[in-house]
Amino acid sequence: MFQRFIRAIKSMFGGLISSMEDPKLILEQNIRELNDQIPQMNENIATVKANLLMLQKERSRNEKSIQDLTNKVRSAIQANRDDIAEGYALQLEKAKESLVHTEEQLQFAERAYEKALKVKKVFMKEKDRKIQEAKEALRASERSEWQAKISDTLEQFEVGGIDQTHDEMINRLNERSAKNEARMEIALDSIDTETMEIEANAEKLRAKSLVEQFKMEMGDKSGSINIDEEAPAKEKDSSKTVGNKEKSSS
């Protein structure tokens, strides 16, 4: 009945408690609690170690007492003092019993100390593993929170919000380009292209006349032949060759 009652309580309040728990805070608290247990564990181990040292010293005292009482019994017997030897013999018997009891306690203390060291070793290993896992989980949580913030920030960069302005500006640029092209066509149509061609041909004729005049002036000059003089000679040779070819062909 009691177990059913506990299950009912857990079913009613378990979900509420779980929703109130912050895994990050709980892991941080677990790390602190694990680290806080180390001083208490060291103190307990020190207590076990102290008990072991006390028993070792007590065993040494018992062994020394047994040795002294044994010597006293022997000395009393040698002195023919059996009455004194009997008193020392009783003390010796009690000392031996105490040594046996001390030995038993010492063995138990040694096992307890070895077990305490093993427990600490296992605890430290498990503690380090749990702390490492907790730190990794905390770092992963921090990374996920950071990535969530970045994602929220990126979602603010909406392309759809500028679609209307974007299309409007594109249309304006296209209209401006079309107007400029129309103006260029109108400007070209307004120019008298025939006049421009006549003037261009006149310029070519004038340039040809100047070249012919320059050639005539070069032909009247005498003296050393330069590169400019060699050019007409080559032209004459070429003209002769062309004339000969024409005659032979005719």
Image (spheres, helix red, strand yellow):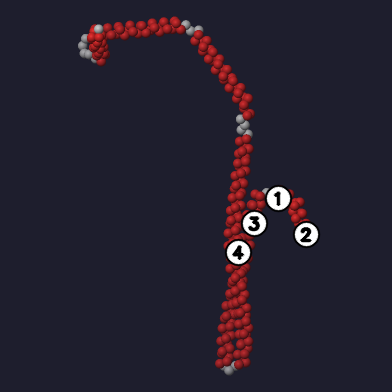
- Give the number of the mark in front: 2 or 4: 2
Q: CA distance from mark 3 to mark 1?
A: 20 Å
Circle number at residue 2: 2
Q: Secondary structure at mark 1?
A: helix
- Give the number of the mark in front: 3 or 2: 2
Q: Please tell me how crowded label 2 is: few (under 14), some (14-19), or many (20+) other residues with Cα within 10 Å.
A: few
Q: CA distance from mark 2 to mark 4?
A: 35 Å
Q: Say which label, 2 or 4, has the lower sequence index.
A: 2
**Amino acid found under the numbered disc labelled 1:** Ser
Write down the residue under mark 3. 33
If the image is split into quadrants, where does the C terminus sit?
Answer: top left
Q: Secondary structure at mark 2?
A: helix
Image coordinates of residue 180 in percent, x first then y, are: 54, 15
Write down the residue under mark 4. 119
- Give the number of the mark in front: 3 or 1: 1
Q: Say which label, 1 or 2, has the lower sequence index.
A: 2
* Residue furthest bottom as drawn: 80
Write down the residue under mark 1. 18
Indicate the quadrant where residue 220 lies.
top left
- Looking at the image, which is closer to me, 234 or 46? 234
Indicate the quadrant where residue 171 lies.
top right
Residue 54 shows in the view: no
Vertical arrangement, residue 219 with respect to residue 27, above or below:
above
Q: CA distance from mark 1 to mark 2?
A: 23 Å
Vertical arrangement, residue 247 with respect to residue 46, above or below:
above
